[in-house]
Image: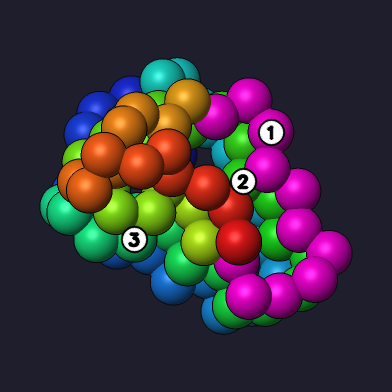
Amino acid sequence: MHEGTYPENLIVNKSLTLQNGSLPVIDGMGGTAINITAENVTIDGFNITNSSYGIKCSALGFTIVNNTIDASEDGNQPRAL
């Protein structure tokens, strides 16, 4: 992904690597910004804002590195589950 703001609630349901091209921002629009449901997923180098969960994961074998996650809608720290 390249520079810019992406208002998205992504569902990753297949093995893949999402890697930044140049400082992309994912605006979770108050929901879960990235929901990982597949194994062998890497999320690398994103700025995630405005989300109840920055990254939520219900699968095994995932890698989350070099991301910045701002405070969530409800004031709790966003977290990978």
Residue 12 appears left or right of 77: right
Residues marked 2 and 1 touching at CB (< 8 Å): yes
Residue 10 appears left or right of 37: left
Residue 75, how many percent across, how many down?
A: 26, 39
Residue type highlighted by circle 1 = Val
Q: Residue at x 76, y 58 (%)?
A: 62
Per the image, the residue denoted by label 2 is: 43
Mark 3 residue element? strand
Quarter of the image with the C terminus is bottom right
Per the image, the residue denoted by label 1 is: 65
Mark 3 to mark 1: distance in Å?
18 Å
Q: In front of the other: label 3 or label 1?
A: 3
Mark 2 residue element? strand
Residue 41, how many percent across, how many down?
A: 71, 60
Quarter-of-image position of residue 66: top right
Q: Is residue 1 magenta?
A: no
Quarter-of-image position of residue 1: top left
The magenta region covers 57-67
20 or 39: nearer the eye? Answer: 39
Q: Residue 16 carries which label?
A: none
Per the image, the residue denoted by label 3 is: 32
Mark 1 residue element? strand
Q: Does the magenta stretch include residue 65?
A: yes
Residue 3 appears left or right of 43: left
Residue type highlighted by circle 2 = Ile
Q: Residue at x 35, y 42 (%)?
A: 76
Question: Measured along the vertical axis of the image, is residue 64 above or below residue 16?
Answer: above
Question: Measured along the vertical axis of the image, is residue 64 above or below residue 5?
Answer: below
48 or 6: nearer the eye? Answer: 48
Residue 35 appears left or right of 73: right
Q: Residue at x 20, y 46 (%)?
A: 73
Residue 27, how many percent across, how many down?
A: 23, 43
